Structures are given as structure tokens and as C-alpha cells.
């Protein structure tokens, strides 16, 4: 297949908008005699006048050859063997061009390279090297299969990605059912790209996602956790969530939570407000750790579970910890939230009762405790979302302004110093 090649004068991609680390990797590979392309989302975003979050490189050098060329390189991954080239504050992920998955899973290609495919069709291990065209056609969506050639500054399109960028379409490369069976996480990625880019999902791909969303149960729970963070930290979390609802992907991801949402459409309001807040924080350049993200998204559901346990006679503190742990541990079958994050979410929810205790020294002790800030951000958000506890919110806001707090970066003597970190705004 002859690719569409845009010469330098015919596209927007410029080296000045590519990270210096990626440029160094591209030129070093080129100077050593290898083909070196900027690949995937970085090219897509540059063509859309967006700032790429990552710059990935594709080459015909094998991982072992790449490691010999770069002292700052480590090889990672079993399913896909990749080279991570480490720079200060940045990792340039460098992959070798891959060949198509053989129709016969027992077929061996290229000698030492390996392939493993489950009965479901999901690819477990795939290190079969190929050509640039084969590599492009192995990628998930046409808009992610574009290359930028450092040798002549051209953009290369083997899959029709340029046309789909122009038409704002997410299109699967190949037959959607088969491609989603190979890697079910691609369905989530389709929703993320549609939401974050403001694109539509091509009709056959959309039908395939709705038909095959149950395949997500085959995805690795640890990988699902990473993908979920990308969904909600992409600065367009509300739009992404709406695509997850439209494709019914929420059910295999968050089974109990999604069914609870479906029982009353009003319950979606909390989630939408949470995601709008998350988007404001991200667009303002503020970092939010995963525990606070999950505490906010599942907050109203957790409060519902807590109230049920309290009605049965359990204390509010015990009910909060039991409700959160029970829900998140069950969810770990599909999305494996780390234990440390679960404990932090438990702390956020169990600390909510402490905001109603304003007598004596309790407020001072609480406000100087390690988990106060996250608990306060949740309390502030829930107060504004539900229009409740307004006087309490004003009390704690004023108390926080006037009280020196323990900086989490300092321990031991002299640790009681006012934090200079600015207040995370909640609108």
C-alpha cells in the first residue's frame, strides 16, 4: 500500500514543538543508520495544534540494539518489549516496528520473536518485528498511525489517519470485533479519544464496542487502573464519562457503582459535577492524586453505603471504612486500586464526621493531621454540590487560614510551619 506523504511545507509539525529529548533520540537513531519516526499520539496532537503529553518513537532497531546505543536506556514489558530512554523528567518510549498478528497463533516468525494469544483472541505477548507499514496497520486507530520522519520532516500516513483527523472520526484499523478482542482496553481508549478530542466514533466501531464491552473482564486489572486515571485526568473527563455511558463500558469497569447510578438519573449530577471540577483543576495545571479522584467520583455512592450501615447501628467512622473497603476491594477484580489508595480513600470518608466536631482542641488537632487537606477538599466539594453545611464550611475555611499546618515534606522538630502551597480552588 502506497502511503500518503506530506512534505514539510504541507503540514504543521515542527521540531520546535517536539521535546528536545525526543529529537535527540530520533537523530541518534538516524545517525546510526536506522529508520526513526515520531509516532502515534504525538503526531496526531501536533497536527491538531495541541500540546502532546508524550512523544513516542518507532524504529527498525530492535530493543537490544537500542539499549546498546543509549546508556540511559532500560528495556521494559513482556507483552510488548519496549525501550525506555531516560532523560531528566522525561521518558521517551521507543518501540520496534511490529508485524501483523498471524492468522495461525502457532505460527513462528522472525526466529527468536514470540507471540502468545489467548482463546478469547487477546494478545498476551507480541514481539514480532515488521516494517513501518505493518507497524502502522497494527496500531489501534487511524489517527494514531501517523509517522513523522526526522530524515526529511515529512508526515507519513498508511492508514487514512489524515482524512479521519480532518473529519474528526475515531476509526479502528482493521475489523473492530477482532481488534477489540486482541486488546479490550482499546474500547476504553476509543471513548477517551472521542471525549478528549471532541471526535465521533465511527459507526461500526461504536456498534462493536456496545456489542463487546464485556470483553473488558479479560483486561489486566492493574492496567485498567492506569487507563482509568488517563480517562479522568485528561482535562475532558466529563465528555469521556458520557462516552463511557453511551457505550455501556461503565458496567464492566464499575459494576456496582454503575448499576446504582442507573437506578436514579439524578445521581449522575454528583459525578458530572465531580468531573467538571476535575477538568478545571487539570486545566489550571493542578495535580490531583488518584485517592482524591476516586473519593470524589464515588463519594455520593459511598455516602449512600455508609448511611445504610449507620442505620444498622454501626458508628460513622466504622461504617465509612467498611463501606469504602468493601466496594473498592470488590472493584479490584476489574480495576485494581492499590491498597495505599484504598486506605487514603477510607481516611477521606471516615474523616468527614470530624468536621461536625468543633468543640475544644479537636479542630486544632484535626486540622494539623496528615489527612486533613484531602478530607477538607472533599468536604468543601460536597458542601457546595449539595448546598449543605455552609456554616461549618465557613468555620473550617477560616480556621485553616489562621492555623499553621504540618508540611507533609517535613518530619521531626521544626515541622510545624505554615504551608505555602496554595488552596486548591473548588468552584
Image (cartoon, rainbow, N blue to C red):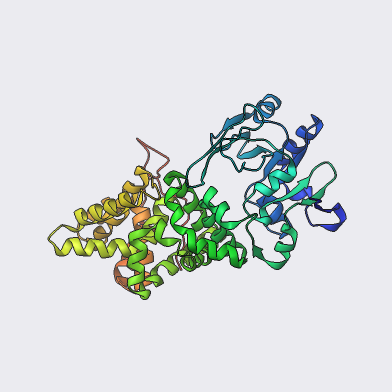
Q: Quadrant of residue 115?
A: top right
Q: Is residue 1 visible?
A: yes
Residue 115 vs 55, above or below: the answer is above
Q: Position of residue 400 (x, y in %)?
A: 36, 58
Q: Position of residue 404 (x, y in %)?
A: 37, 51
Q: Position of residue 28 (x, y in %)?
A: 76, 32
Q: Quadrant of residue 166?
A: bottom right
Taking the view exactly as shown, the residue that stands out farthest to the left is 313
Which one is nearer the viewer's eye here, 274 or 110?
110
Name the residue at 60% across, 43% down. 103
Q: Is residue 399 visible?
A: no
Name the residue at 27% across, 61% down. 355
Q: Position of residue 317 (x, y in %)?
A: 21, 55
Residue 61 vs 4, above or below: the answer is above
Name the residue at 29% across, 70% down. 389
Residue 224 vs 117, above or below: the answer is below
Q: How many numbered marks does the figure carry?
A: 0
Residue 40 vs 352, above or below: the answer is above
Which one is nearer the viewer's eye here, 178 or 185?
178
Which one is nearer the viewer's eye here, 58 or 355?
58
Amino acid at each position: 500500500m502506497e502511503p500518503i506523504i506530506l512534505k514539510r511545507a504541507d503540514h504543521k509539525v515542527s521540531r520546535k514543538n517536539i521535546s528536545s529529548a525526543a529529537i535527540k533520540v530520533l537523530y541518534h537513531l538516524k545517525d546510526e543508520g536506522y529508520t526513526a519516526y515520531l509516532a502515534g499520539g504525538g503526531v496526531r496532537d501536533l497536527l491538531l495544534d495541541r500540546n502532546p503529553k508524550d512523544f513516542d518513537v518507532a524504529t527498525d532497531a530492535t530493543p537490544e540494539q537500542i539499549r546498546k546505543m543509549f546508556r540511559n536506556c532500560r528495556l521494559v514489558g513482556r507483552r510488548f518489549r519496549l525501550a525506555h530512554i531516560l532523560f531528566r523528567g522525561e521518558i521517551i518510549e521507543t518501540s520496534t516496528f511490529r508485524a501483523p498478528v498471524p492468522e495461525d497463533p502457532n505460527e513462528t516468525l522472525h526466529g527468536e520473536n514470540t507471540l502468545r494469544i489467548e482463546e478469547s483472541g487477546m494478545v498476551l505477548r507480541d514481539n514480532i518485528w515488521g516494517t513501518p507499514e505493518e507497524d502502522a496497520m497494527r496500531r489501534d486507530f487511524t489517527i494514531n498511525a501517523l509517522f513523522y520522519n526526522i530524515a526529511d520532516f515529512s508526515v507519513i500516513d498508511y492508514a487514512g489517519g489524515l482524512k479521519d483527523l480532518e473529519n474528526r472520526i475515531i476509526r479502528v484499523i482493521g475489523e473492530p470485533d477482532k481488534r477489540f478482542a486482541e486488546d479490550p482496553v482499546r474500547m476504553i481508549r476509543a471513548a477517551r479519544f472521542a471525549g478528549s478530542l471532541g471526535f465521533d466514533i465511527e459507526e461500526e466501531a461504536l456498534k462493536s464496542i456496545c456489542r463487546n464491552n464485556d470483553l473488558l473482564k479479560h483486561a489486566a486489572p492493574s492496567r485498567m487502573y492506569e487507563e482509568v486515571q488517563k480517562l479522568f485526568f485528561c482535562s475532558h473527563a466529563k465528555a469521556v464519562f458520557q462516552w463511557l455511558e453511551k457505550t455501556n463500558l461503565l458496567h464492566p469497569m464499575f459494576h456496582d457503582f454503575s448499576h446504582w447510578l442507573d437506578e436514579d438519573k439524578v445521581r449522575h449530577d454528583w459525578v458530572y459535577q465531580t468531573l467538571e471540577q476535575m477538568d478545571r483543576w487539570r486545566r489550571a495545571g493542578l495535580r490531583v492524586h488518584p485517592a482524591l479522584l476516586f473519593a470524589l467520583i464515588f463519594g455520593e455512592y459511598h455516602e449512600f453505603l455508609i448511611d445504610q450501615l449507620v442505620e444498622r447501628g454501626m458508628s460513622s467512622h466504622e461504617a465509612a471504612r467498611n463501606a469504602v473497603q468493601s466496594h473498592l476491594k470488590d472493584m479490584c477484580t476489574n480495576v485494581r486500586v492499590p491498597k495505599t489508595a484504598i486506605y487514603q480513600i477510607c481516611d477521606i470518608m471516615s474523616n468527614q464526621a470530624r468536621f461536625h466536631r468543633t468543640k475544644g482542641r479537636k479542630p486544632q488537632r484535626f486540622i494539623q493531621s496528615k489527612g486533613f487537606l484531602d478530607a477538607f477538599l472533599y468536604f468543601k466539594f460536597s458542601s457546595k454540590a449539595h448546598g449543605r453545611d455552609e456554616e461549618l464550611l465557613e468555620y473550617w475555611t477560616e480556621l485553616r487560614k489562621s492555623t499553621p499546618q504540618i508540611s507533609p515534606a517535613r518530619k521531626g522538630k521544626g515541622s510545624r510551619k505554615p504551608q505555602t502551597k496554595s488552596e486548591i480552588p473548588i468552584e
